[in-house]
């Protein structure tokens, strides 16, 4: 069984640290700048702590594990492997985007951590102080609770917060590069999408409109990516993953949003990935386990229209070719395609519903899910 180790947690900013001066001398000025640039009121002083590298890294990693517990890391590791994002090996590091900002605001202890040397750039300190102001005004602790219940909603909430901070500070998303997993995790940070929505909201309605997104948070990444969906508060269509399919049992299930669909295709360079994901209406991803311990991942998606599902069907063929090189295709009615490679892969579309499964018995599981949705 694969043991995928999370060495860096997606979405956390890694900085160096160790006990040091309590705060930078210009901290109050930077906090006022963060307030002016973001339009968010200062409710209280933000405590600061300057740390050395090892202590800083340890503090950030502890916080990361607190918000991303072992159970979720294990689920995601298995899902990433079966989606072709990581090799099928015994030991695979689960890396993620690392921002060398050297500053990070901890919403649990509500303090700003700073690296002693080299010092953080001004823009990154302002960025983290804006996050602190968001916390003071709207409570960032809500996001950690969301992650356990709804992956897609948590990503959307975190993205609008980070996007708001980036819009004020001028910080940009890191370049998307590296392995498919590294590309996927960088895109999953949602910084670019959050910044774009924050910019649109501020343009349309000023600070008050942006505050509405921070107060309510987008409910899905579809709302994050499309301002009209956010303003209409359009909810995701329900998707059902049955607890059992024959003797296979559902062991874990998470929401799988438009951003997930888009990023999975982009990670493998699938053409027109953004357009193929835009018709997303709802989605879930789950792990099914056989009596002998075999595990298969299944992604069930509902689309806004039949044309949208057909566009996804075309994209899936390209995705399989890139994610599972050398995959041998075969017919497997009533599904649209089955492939044999690192994992057996099966995909099908029925009306405005689609299913993608990867792992043992993928064709049987995909067919059953397609009919039941």
Image (tube, rainbow, N blue to C red):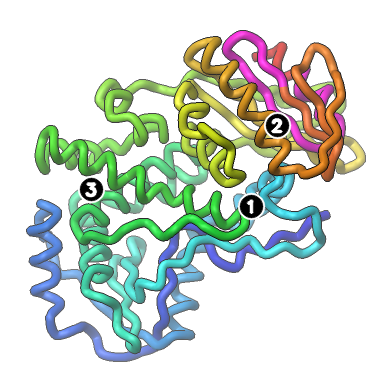
Vertical position of residue 287 compared to residue 126: above or below: above
In the rendered image of this protein, does residue 306 appear above or below residue 50? above
Element at badge 1?
A: helix
Q: Residues within 10 Å of mark 3 (few under 14, many from 20)?
A: some
Q: Magenta span covers which residues?
A: 348-368
Q: Position of residue 293 (x, y in %)?
A: 87, 43
Q: Earlier in the sequence, mark 2 or mark 3?
A: 3
Distance between mark 2 and mark 3 Cα atoms = 36 Å
Q: Are marks 1 and 2 in contact (CB under 8 Å)?
A: no
For residue 290, say whether it is visible: yes
Mark toward the viewer: 1 or 2: 2
Q: To which residue does mark 3 refer?
A: 138
Q: Is residue 93 left or right of residue 148?
A: right
Alpha-carbon neighbours of circle 2 within 10 Å: few (<14), some, or many (≥20)?
many
Tell me, yes or no, whether the highlighted magenta stretch contains residue 172. Answer: no
Report how far apart the C-alphas of labels 3 and 1 lie in the structure. 28 Å
Give whichever of 228, 40 is nearer the camera. Answer: 228
The residue at which mark 1 appears reads as 71
Residue 363 on the magenta span: yes
């Amino acid at each position: 069984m694969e043991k995928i180790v999370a060495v860096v947690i997606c979405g956390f900013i890694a900085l160096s640290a160790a006990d040091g001066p309590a705060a930078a001398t210009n901290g109050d000025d930077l906090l006022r700048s963060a307030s002016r640039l973001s339009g968010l009121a200062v409710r209280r002083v933000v405590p600061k702590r300057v740390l050395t590298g090892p202590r800083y890294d340890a503090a950030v990693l502890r916080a990361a594990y607190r918000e991303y517990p072992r159970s979720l890391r294990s689920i995601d590791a298995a899902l990433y492997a079966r989606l072709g994002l990581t090799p099928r090996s015994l030991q695979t590091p689960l890396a993620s985007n690392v921002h060398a900002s050297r500053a990070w605001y901890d919403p649990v202890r509500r303090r700003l951590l700073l690296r002693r040397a080299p010092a953080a750039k001004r823009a990154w300190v302002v960025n983290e102080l804006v996050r602190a102001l968001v916390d003071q005004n709207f409570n960032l602790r809500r996001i950690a609770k969301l992650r356990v219940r709804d992956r897609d909603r948590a990503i959307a909430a975190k993205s609008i917060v980070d996007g708001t901070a980036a819009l004020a500070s001028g910080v940009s998303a890191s370049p998307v590069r590296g392995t498919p997993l590294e590309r996927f995790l960088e895109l999953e940070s949602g910084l670019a999408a959050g910044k774009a929505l924050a910019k649109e909201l501020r343009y349309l309605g000023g600070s008050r409109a942006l505050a509405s997104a921070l107060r309510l948070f987008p409910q899905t990444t579809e709302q994050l990516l499309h301002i009209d969906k956010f303003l209409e508060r359009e909810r995701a269509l329900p998707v059902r993953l049955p607890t059992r399919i024959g003797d296979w049992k559902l062991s874990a299930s998470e929401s799988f949003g438009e951003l997930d669909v888009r990023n999975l295709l982009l990670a493998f360079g699938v053409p027109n990935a953004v357009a193929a994901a835009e018709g997303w209406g709802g989605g879930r991803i789950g792990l099914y386990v056989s009596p002998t311990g075999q595990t298969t991942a299944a992604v069930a998606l509902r689309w806004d229209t039949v044309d949208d599902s057909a566009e996804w069907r075309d994209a899936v063929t390209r995705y399989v070719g890139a994610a599972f090189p050398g995959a041998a295709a075969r017919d497997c009615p009533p599904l649209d395609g089955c492939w044999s490679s690192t994992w057996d892969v099966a995909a099908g579309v029925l009306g405005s519903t689609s299913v993608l499964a990867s792992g043992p018995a993928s064709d049987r599981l995909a067919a059953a899910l397609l009919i039941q949705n």
